[in-house]
Image (cartoon, coloured by chain):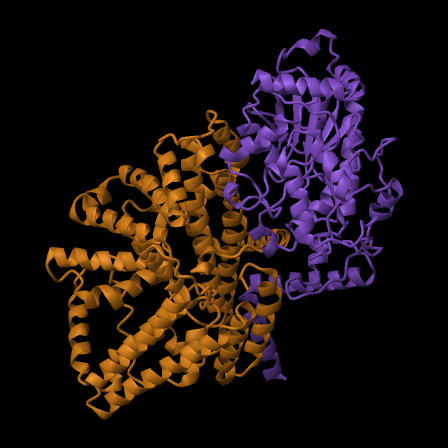
Amino acid sequence: MGSADKKVKKKKKKIAKCPLFIMICLTITGMMAFGVIMSAMGEYEWKLTWEHPVFAAVLLDERPVNEPEPEPEPVQKVEEAPVVTDAVKEATDIMAEEPSSDAVEEESSEEEEVIISDEEYMEMYGEIPYYIEGGGAVKYITWDTGEPRSRYYSNPGVRPITSEYHYTHIGNPDYYENCLFIGDSRIGGLGTYSGWNKAFFAYKNGTSVYNIMEANLSVINGMNATLPELLEVGPYRMIFIMLGINEIGMDTADYGQRFGEILATIREYQPETPIVIIGNTFVTKERDNSDNVTNNANINDKNVAIACYANGEDIFYFDVNPALVDEEGYLRSDITRDGVHITAQHYHLWVDWMNEHGFYEGYEIDPYAEEENSEGTDEGEATENGEGEAVADGMDDNSEGGQ
Amino acid sequence: MVFSGLAFIFHFLPIFLIVYYIAKPRFRNIVLLLGSLVFYALGSPVYVLLLVVSVLVNYFIAGRIQKIYAGGQVKDDEEESDTDDDPDIDIIDFDIETETEDKEEKEALTKVKSPAATIWLITALIYDLGILCIFKYLDFILEMTGSVLKMDMGSIGLALPLGISFYTFQMISFIVDVYRADIPRKVSLLHFAAYSTMFPQITSGPITRYGEVSERLEQEKGVSPRLLEKGVTAFIIGLGYKVLLADKIAALWNDIWRVGAYGVDVASAWLGAWAYSMEIYFDFFGYSLMAMGVGWMLGFELPVNFSEPYSVKTMTSFWRNWHMTLGRWFKDYLYIPLGGNRCSKIRMLFNMLVVWLLTGIWHGAGYNFIIWGLFLFAVLMLEKLTYGKWMEKTKVLGHLYMIVLIPVSWTIFNITDVTQLSEYLLRMIGVPLEGMVVYGFSMLWELVQTYWWLLLICILFCTPYPMKFFKKYYKNFLVKLMLLAVFWYSVYQSALSGGNPFIYFKF
C-alpha cells in the first residue's frame, strides 16, 4: 500500500511540474471530444484528414453541407464540347482583337454564344435573392473548365462576357468624377495607379462579400468609412463593384447570393445609379496549375454566379480579362508578381480597357455636358440606352478624331 | 509537414510522443529514428531514400576512418572530450585565437597520420557536396554556363530534397569530427542515423554537432517533467512568433511586393524591407524555438540558433547572433582550416571572402545570394578594418546603422530576380524609375493605417525584452494561461490560413 501511495504521490508531483503541458493535453482532448460529439450530432461537418483534426470544423465553424453540390449541367452545348484550350483561345482571340467595338461580341455570339435561362440559373445556384426583371443581358460563351479541382466550385460550362452596350471611348479621366469603386486589393490598386483622382475608391485588402458591409474601408485620400456610410452620402454617378478573389475558397452559390444581397443594398441606397459588376480577373498559368482553389476555373465559376445580376439596363457586367490575359487565357505572367494582382505599372492596361467602355458618349468632348440636366447624369445614360447604335457609332468616330 | 501546421501539432507530434514515452528508454532511439523517417517521408516521400543512402554512405566512411585510427595509434578514448562547446569561443568572430584552438588543431593534425583517412574524408566530402550540388545547384550552374556561352543548356528540374542543405552540413560535421578524432568511440549506426535524421532539426536546423546530442543518444535517459514543460513552453512561444507575428507581418511585404518597385514610394520601400526583415526573423527564430522545444520534449538539448540579433550594433555582432549554428559550422569547418586569421591580412580577407560567398550560395542558387554574400563580406571587411570596434562602443549610432543595414541585406536576400532587386534598391534610395506610377505617399499612408498596431508589436518583439520576460516569468501560472491562449489562437490562425511554409524550408 505504502509503496503504491508513494508512486501516486510521485506521479502527482511529476504532473505538478508540467502544468502547461497538462493544460494543453486537456484542452486538446476536450476540443477533440467536442468536435467528435458535435459532428456526430450533425452540427459540424465530419471531416477528418491528416491536415484537418476533428475539432478544426468547430474552430472554423464548418457546417455540414445538406445537399450535394449541384452537378454542372451542360447548358445548351453547341455541337460537341470544345477542348478547354481551344475554347479559351477562341474566347480570348475574339475579345482581344479590338476591345472597343461592338462587333467583337457580335462575332462571338455567332460562334459560341449560349444564353442561360433564368430557370437554368436557379437550377445551378439555387434561388437568386435579387433579380431584375428582364435580366440576362449578359451573354456567355461556352467554356468547359473540366473536372473541378476542389469542392468549392463547379464547372458551369460557360463564361460570361461584357454586357452588350454601345460603349464609347473615354478621353478624359474626369469621366470618373463622383464614381464609386467598391472592392478588395485589386480595386485598391486601380485606385492608386489609375490616376482617376476624382473617383472614390472604397476598398480593403482581403475583404469579401462576407464582410464588405461592416469593413472599415479605405477611401483614397486617407479617409475611412463603411460601405453603408458611403452609400448614404451619394448619389454617385456610377458604382463599380469587384469582389470575389478572397471568397475563392467559399461555396460559389453562397458567394453569388451574398453578392446579390450587396447589390440589393446598394440599389436601396442609390436607386438611380448605374452599377457595373467587374468580373474577377484571372490568375497566371503557374498559379492556376499549382492551386486547386485559386484557379481560373473557380474564378470563372464565381463570375458566372454574379454576371447574372446584370440586366444591360442599369446593371452591367464587365469582363476586363481580355486586356490582361495571354493567348492561352491566363493572366500575363509579365504583369504580375504573385500571379493574382497586377503590378503598378501595368494597371494602365485595365484603365485603357475601361476607357474603351464608357457609357456617356461625347464625354471626352465636353466633360460637363451631361450635368446640364441637373443631377441627371443617370437619366442621360438611360436615354442613350434607347438611342441606339447610330449615336454610339458617331461618337466613336469623334473620339478617334479627338485623340 | 511544418511545425506550425495542424497535421504536425495534432497528429504527428502527439502520436510520436505517446509512442516515445511509452517505449522503454533503450528503444527510444529506434522510435526516434522511425518517427523521423516517417516525418521526412510525409514531407518528401521520394527523397527519404536519398536520405537513407546518405546516412549509410557517411556512416560507412566514418567507420572506415575510425577503423584506420584503431589500426594505427589511436589516442586513449577517455582522454578526448567534446571540444566543440567552449562557450568562450566566439561564434562568428574569426579574430579570436585561443590557445585551446591551437592545441586542438595540432592534436587533430597529429592524429591524422594515415593518408587513407584523408582519402576517405575527401570521398565523403565529394559525395555529400556532390549530392548537394546536383540537387541544389546544377540547374543554376547550367543556367550560368548557358548565359556565358550564350546557348540554352536546358535544365534538370529536380525538386529540392527537404532539408538537404542542413543535413548535408550536419553529416559533414560528423565526418570531419571523426577525422579529427573528436568523436573517439565507435558510434552505432542507430545513434548516427537517429542523430542525422532527427525530426526536430532535419528540415531547417539547428545544425547540431554529434557531441551535443551524443550523451543523450548513448545514455538513453528518460525525459524529466521539467524538461517537458520547458519544451512545451518554447514550442508555444515559437508557434506564436511564426503564426501570429511572421505570417501576419508577411502581409505588409506582400502588399508592396505585388505592386512592384514601379508603384512604391521611398518610405514604403523601406517599410517593406523592414517588414520583411521582421518576417524572416520571427519565422526562423520561431522555427528554431519550436525545434528546440521539441528537442527538449524528447530529452535533447539542441544548440541555440539566435540570440537577439536585432539589438546589436554591427554586422559582425549580428552574424554572431543570427543562425549561430551555421556561423559556427563555417568557422569550424572552413574558415579555420583555410588558415583563419593567423595569416597575412590579404589571406585573411580572402578566407573571409570564401566563407561569405559560400554562406550566400548555401542559402540558395541564385545571383542575388552571391550578391548578398559579397555585400556581407564587404560590410564585415569594412567593420573589421575600420569602424567596427568604434561602432560597438557607440550608444545610438550603432543601432541606427543596423536599422539601415539589416533591411538592405534582407532585401538583397529576398528578391531573387536581379532586375527586380536593382529596381527595388533604386527605389529605396529614391531614384525614380522610368514609367513609374507613384502618386505621393498614399501607399505609405495606407500601409501605416492598416498595419500600425502590428508594426508596433513586431518592433517590440525585435527587442530583447519579450524573451527576457518569458525567461523570467514562464513558471508563473498567469503566463502559462497566456501561453495556452497563444497556443489556441495560433492554432486557429493556422487553421484559417491553411498553414504557411517556413521561409527556411526552401533552402
Whether residue B16 is visible, yes or no, is: yes
Is A74 placed above or below A277 here?
A: below
Image quadrant in which you'd find residue B1 = bottom right
Q: Position of residue B478 (x, y in %)?
A: 56, 52
Seen at 50% across and 31% down, the residue is B443
Residue B193, quarter of picture: bottom left
Q: Check the rendered structure and report the hue given to chain B.
A: orange
Q: Foreground: B208 or A77? A: A77
**In the image, residue A13 lies at what x, y percent?**
55, 70
Q: Nearer the viewer, residue B427 or B40?
A: B427
Image colour for chain A is purple
**Is B140 left or right of A269, judged from the image as shown?**
left
| Res A249 seen here | no
Q: Is residue A179 left or right of residue B89?
A: right
Number of disc labels: 0
Q: Which residue occupies the extreme left position in the image?
A: B344
As drawn, B241 above or below A139: below
Left or right relative to B110: residue A178: right
